Amino acid sequence: MTKKTISRFFGFALLVSATLLVLAIIGLILFDLLAKGSSAFSWHFLTSFPQKGMTEGGIFPAIFGTTIVTLLSTALAMPLGIGCAVYLQEYAADNNLTRLIRASVRNLAGVPSIVYGLFGLSIFVEGMGMGVSVLAAGCTLGLLTLPSIIATTEEALRNVPRLSREGSLALGATPWECVYTVVLPSAVPGILTGLILALSRAAGETAPILFTGVAFYSRYLPGSVFDEFMALPYHLYILSTQHHAIEAVRPLAYATALTLLLLVFLLNLTAFWVRARHKR
Amino acid sequence: MEKIKLDVQALDLFFGKKQVLKNIHLSIPEGKITALIGPSGCGKSTLLRSINRLHDLHPDARLMGKILLDGHNILHRNTNVVHLRRRVGMVFQKPNPFPMSIAENVAYGLKINALCSKSEMRARVEQSLRNSFLWEEVADDLDKSALELSGGQQQRLCIARAIAVEPEVILFDEPCSALDPISTAKIEELIMGLRGKFTQVIVTHNMQQAQRVADYTAFMYLGELIEFGETRQIFEKPQQELTKNYVSGHFG
């Protein structure tokens, strides 16, 4: 064997083993969750309230809380994020100010989520008097997802061919008509995919809701946006570190993790489906 | 003497520091077909895109001089660009139908410019599709996506879309460069059929195409207009040495 074939072989082997290692880790996590959580995982678990100091029963309020807070955060962040991206990409002149705004947005994406939590506490909970509530947590999570929504929307808009825009403008469309009737519709798959990925990240966040809305335990579902709520990631945290009988509730904790994973997986599947459907 | 529809006067165009068009003078007669020919990079597409001010999208572009449309300078800062583009339609190098149905594509310009009522829309769409020789092929599929059409059909759809708003001028930017010979022949037939109804300006690489369709031909080279005249004269009795070399295939 020549030196070249040997180095090629080793290079290839390195790449394959790196890939296999990553797959093995993912497989191990899934297997662990399934093995330890599936005994507690059932329809009853998904649909009922926690009972007997959370040692029995289900996690329905946590599923409900995570779902509505995520939906609320999307409803708040979507118009803002898309609007901001349309402005930056379609209207703003290519100058230093625009570049500064863009760089700031990108940096915001790197801010630790606990910082968003503190910000939410001081602005929404206290400053704006929302109290510890679904609304305050939704706003905080919305802020957290904004940078990534802006970035992916901008990317999706950038990918709309120049020829489509020109076709519309050449027919006497105003810039806004061009954006609204041609550019945005063409960018919908990209925007939706980014949105759903942001959403699935928001669903799994604990730190931003920690000070702003999540409850340790609640006997009722939130009746309005000014109530506290239970959430899956926080519930998981409690079951695995704060409970008085940690060992006893281990299966419940694993089943909760499994549920959260399923929820995020479902969201990602939706993103995948949206993209595939629009490609045709 | 024919009526002049478009009069380009002393037009200079810069992209940043680079001068792309140099002192262009060109008078385009109404209702005729005028071809712009010349080697790649000579500025013919750039000149064409000045006529509906598409360079406005390019922040580096600077235009000096005048382009008169019916005597009014369209390069003036007070020109309503949206209105101008309604009067001066354009068909692009590659077919660019919108991701909508066939009918919606044709209705697009009518809708955004509010040119006709909803009840008239269908008739206007049909008329435009008939005028672009596409009606027979798509009459039953008006609600299908325009992206499912063949390249040639898409380009005829783009022409239908352009003529639907009844512009005065139509600019064609190498409309057949992405098409096969049969589709090309159909487009040429279509352009010739529209002679008299619209003032048409067509940029083409293809000298045979210019000879087949154009009443007048302008030859451009390195950003300058070298020669302009009746197509026959340009190809058979060119006055300039450069034109002669180009049309006889010595370079380009």
Image (cartoon, rainbow, N blue to C red):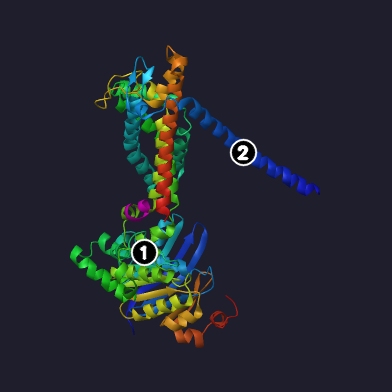
* Amino acid type at mark 2: Leu
**The N terminus of chain B is located in which quarter?**
bottom left
Query: Magenta segment, principal secondary structure?
Result: helix
Q: Measuring 48% from the left and 61% from the top, which residue is drawn there?
A: B14
In front of the other: A232 or A212: A232
Where is residue A245 drawn, in percent x and y? 44, 13
Q: Residues within 10 Å of mark 1 (few under 14, many from 20)?
A: many
Q: Measuring 35% from the left and 56% from the top, which residue is drawn there?
A: A182
**Does residue A197 appear in the picture of this structure?**
no
Judging from the image, what secondary structure is the residue with disc 1 in? helix
Give the alpha-carbon distance from disc 1 to disc 2, as whole Å. 44 Å
**Magenta part of the chain:** A180-185
Where is residue A51 drawn, in percent x and y? 34, 18
In front of the other: B12 or B158: B158
* Amino acid type at mark 1: Ala
Position of A198 with respect to B138 (left or right) is right
Q: Would you name the residue on which mark 2 appears? A: A20
Please identify the quarter of the rendering in which residue A270 is found. top left
Q: Would you name the residue on which mark 1 appears? A: B146
